[in-house]
Image (cartoon, grey):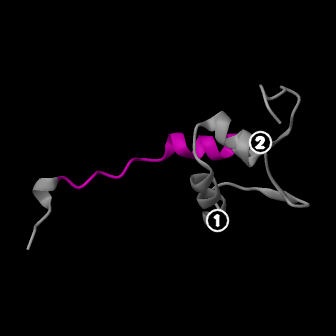
Amino acid sequence: MKGPIPMEKRALSISEFCARYGIGRTTTYEEIRSGRLRAVKVGRRTLVTESDAESWLATLTNAKAKPRESLSDVTFD
């Protein structure tokens, strides 16, 4: 499907989900595999319902970012 996603649509394909939330396919499948994003199979297609997509998004806004390791903390041998 090309173009904007109709508002009455209740489930998104992986491509539509990626476009809407701005993440890649690999990251999307990693989120599904980890259990953080729920998806359903319909035949060969993998779909994410609107409610599951919004639940996933809500968990991201509540997540705290891990502090990054700075180069000054890294030792080189």
Whether residue 32 sits left or right of residue 9 in the image: it is: left
Instruction: Examine the structure image and report whether residue 29 is included in the region drawn in magenta.
Output: no
| Residue located beneath label 2 in the image | 51
Q: Which mark is residue 33?
A: 1
Q: Residues within 10 Å of mark 1 (few under 14, many from 20)?
A: few
Whether residue 49 sits left or right of residue 70 in the image: it is: right
Give the quadrant of residue 34.
bottom right
Instruction: Examine the structure image and report whether residue 58 is included in the region drawn in magenta.
Output: yes
Residue at the image point whose x is 86% and y is 61% from the top: 44
Choose the circle earlier in sequence order: 2 or 1. Answer: 1
- Quarter of the picture holding the N terminus: top right
Whether residue 64 sits left or right of residue 46 in the image: it is: left
Q: Are marks 2 and 1 in contact (CB under 8 Å)?
A: no
Image coords of residue 9 (percent x, y)? 87, 34
Distance of mark 2 from mark 1, alpha carbons? 18 Å
43, above or below 68, in the image: below
Residue type beneath disc 2: Ser
Q: Which residues are magenta?
A: 54-70
Residue at the image point whose x is 51% and y is 43% from the top: 62
Secondary structure under tag 1 reads helix
